[in-house]
Image (cartoon, rainbow, N blue to C red):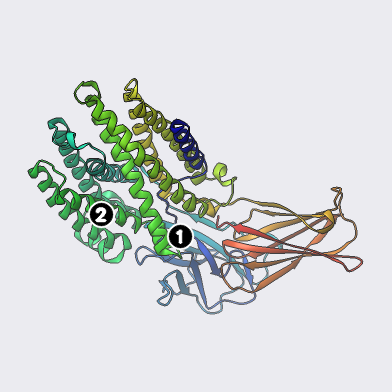
């Protein structure tokens, strides 16, 4: 009966992992709206250009410039962040700009520390062609480079070893093994090595972020002025100072742990808490810190980081203590560690699943984005690897229950190596644009009264000009022929911008088409489809959709 219960729990956890994508999520700043809008045609010259982003932007390395078709600047060179709203970048324009096409070139550093830049075209007066966009609005975010991947991975992994080893010592190792010379020496060495790696990764993270936020090279950032600017003018700099203070405290208590030669005393507990506090600082530099529900998202991100770190760090402990399973006098104690950690492991996986599901649903708009976006592909790969980790964990769980050490070393190392790869993918996810920026075309069919259906297709479903197609069919799937007019009414669900209505042209029976720039910001929208029949009856439905920024 107990075996069946345990198996049921593992199957449940495995299913949860299939539908959860735990990650250390962060995202770049994206345009909510701009004035002028992308590809907007204005009747007269505007007084200024402004861009509003979905999060606050940092005071370093931002610019907004406006050029005419000849490459001449037409702004007043006074670009700045709006002092009343730190998510708006604006600049004044020269008076009485002549008719023609213009482009706004902008660059900002988002709250997660990554530079984003792009181009927004607009037009004053009638253009040379009609009903065609001037050009495509472009947005380019930061792409993770090898230096970032290596430094961030070392930071994640070393912090995980430090926290996980202390957790393992405090909650998992049986009392009879606490004073075992091999156990004490191994833990002491791993704690010191992980601290040194954590120290180096955090110290190098400041110049790393300087190269990213200031878009410069490593050779240019090692000077007092540049590093001072990073510390005083960026959100990351403030958190970095706190991390350095934490490292100083951690150095003191790490030395005391070594000097005291390990015992379950207050020094170990304080070191464990400081290690967890450093994980909390990571949550304050993620996208969670700029979300609308800041406290909730930081808490979830923090829980996720702590759970993942304890899992990875404990796996390191189990792997390095494998020699204990080969000795007759410590074999039973080692298998007891496997059983004791398995109980914690189930709880850890449940926490990872719950936080991962919540976070991922905030950044994955649809199943398509798992295949057609870089973020979705990396997330899918991470989910598969996490499922493999769960399989390894289940194997180790049952081996521990049966006191069977056969092939235990292989499955433990398999679980640990998979976890190390997962951390690499986590670093990539932290620095890739989320899938919310590219949800893809809308293709939704809604059933209405009398068995009829309304299909809405929107391409490319981004800010700027889109093609809107509506198909009307009866209960037998045939095109409705008695339609007098079809309109679409657009309403943003995230900002009160009023409503905008367009009338579609009939291409053929049951098929209606229009082009327009009615999606002028990214995010959640509602499209109300209204069809008026020739006998003055109406067919209505609401279709929610997510509009991308690129």
Q: Is residue 123 above or below residue 27?
A: below
Q: Earlier in the sequence, mark 2 or mark 1?
A: 1
Q: Residue at x 37, y 65 (%)?
A: 58
- Mark 2 Cα shell of 10 Å, populated few (<14), some (14-19), many (≥20): some
From the viewer's perspective, tell me whether residue 362 is left or right of residue 405: right
From the viewer's perspective, tell me whether residue 500 is left or right of residue 288: right
Q: Tag on residue 497? A: none
The picture places residue 396, in percent across and down from the top left corner, at 37, 29
Q: Is residue 49 visible?
A: yes
Q: CA distance from mark 2 to mark 1?
A: 24 Å
The picture places residue 428, in percent across and down from the top left corner, at 41, 45
Q: Which residue is mark 2?
A: 221
From the viewer's perspective, tell me whether residue 161 is left or right of residue 179: right
Q: Is residue 109 visible?
A: no
The residue furthest left is 259
Q: Tag on residue 29? A: 1
Which quadrant would residue 370 be assigned to in this image? top right
Instruction: Identify the element where label 1 is drawn.
Output: loop
The picture places residue 69, in percent across and down from the top left corner, at 56, 63
Instruction: Identify the element where label 2 is drawn.
Output: loop
The picture places residue 151, in percent across and down from the top left corner, at 29, 45
């Amino acid at each position: 009966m107990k075996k069946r219960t345990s198996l049921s729990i593992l199957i449940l956890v495995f299913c949860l992992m299939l539908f959860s994508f735990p990650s250390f999520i962060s995202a770049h700043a994206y345009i909510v709206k701009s004035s002028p809008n992308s590809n907007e045609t204005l009747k007269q010259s505007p007084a200024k250009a402004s861009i509003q982003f979905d999060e606050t932007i940092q005071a370093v390395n931002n610019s907004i410039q406006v050029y005419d078709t000849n490459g001449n600047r037409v702004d007043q060179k006074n670009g700045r962040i709006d002092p009343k709203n730190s998510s708006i970048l604006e600049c004044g324009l020269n008076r009485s700009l002549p008719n023609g096409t213009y482009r706004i070139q902008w660059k900002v550093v988002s709250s997660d520390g990554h530079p984003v830049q792009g181009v927004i075209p607009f037009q004053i007066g009638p253009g040379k062609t009609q009903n065609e966009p001037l050009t495509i609005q472009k947005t380019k975010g930061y792409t993770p480079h090898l230096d970032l991947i290596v430094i961030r991975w070392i930071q994640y992994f070393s912090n995980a070893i430090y926290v996980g080893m202390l957790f393992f010592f405090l909650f998992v190792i049986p009392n009879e093994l606490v004073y075992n010379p091999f156990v004490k020496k191994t833990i002491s060495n791993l704690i010191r090595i992980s601290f040194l790696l954590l120290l180096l990764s955090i110290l190098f993270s400041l110049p790393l972020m300087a190269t990213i936020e200031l878009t410069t090279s490593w050779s240019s950032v090692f000077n007092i002025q540049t590093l001072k600017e990073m510390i005083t003018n960026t959100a990351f700099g403030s958190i970095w100072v706190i991390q350095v203070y934490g490292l100083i405290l951690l150095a003191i208590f790490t030395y005391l742990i070594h000097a005291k030669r390990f015992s379950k005393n207050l020094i170990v507990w304080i070191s464990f808490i400081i290690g967890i506090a450093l994980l909390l600082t990571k949550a304050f530099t993620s996208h969670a810190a700029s979300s609308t529900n800041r406290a909730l998202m930081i808490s979830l991100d923090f829980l996720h980081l702590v759970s993942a770190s304890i899992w990875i760090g404990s796996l390191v402990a189990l792997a390095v203590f494998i020699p204990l399973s080969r000795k007759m006098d410590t074999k039973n104690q080692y298998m007891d560690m496997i059983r004791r950690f398995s109980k914690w492991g189930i709880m850890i996986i449940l926490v990872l699943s719950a936080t991962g599901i919540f976070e991922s649903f905030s950044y994955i708009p649809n199943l398509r984005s798992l295949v057609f976006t870089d973020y979705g592909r990396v997330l899918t790969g991470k989910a598969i690897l996490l499922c493999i980790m769960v399989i390894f964990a289940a194997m180790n769980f049952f081996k521990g229950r049966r006191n069977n050490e056969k092939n235990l070393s292989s499955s433990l190392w398999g679980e640990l190596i998979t976890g190390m790869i997962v951390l690499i993918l986590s670093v990539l996810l932290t620095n890739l644009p989320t899938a919310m920026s590219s949800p893809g075309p809308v293709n939704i069919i809604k059933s209405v009264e009398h068995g009829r259906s309304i299909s809405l297709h929107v391409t490319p479903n981004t800010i700027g000009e889109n093609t809107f197609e509506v198909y009307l069919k009866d209960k037998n799937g045939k095109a409705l022929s008695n339609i007098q007019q079809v309109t679409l009414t657009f309403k943003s669900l995230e900002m009160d911008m009023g409503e905008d209505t367009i009338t579609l042209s009939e291409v053929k029976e049951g098929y209606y088409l229009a082009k327009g720039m009615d999606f002028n910001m990214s995010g959640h929208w509602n499209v109300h489809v209204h069809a008026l029949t020739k006998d003055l009856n109406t067919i209505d439905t609401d279709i929610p959709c997510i509009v991308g920024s690129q």
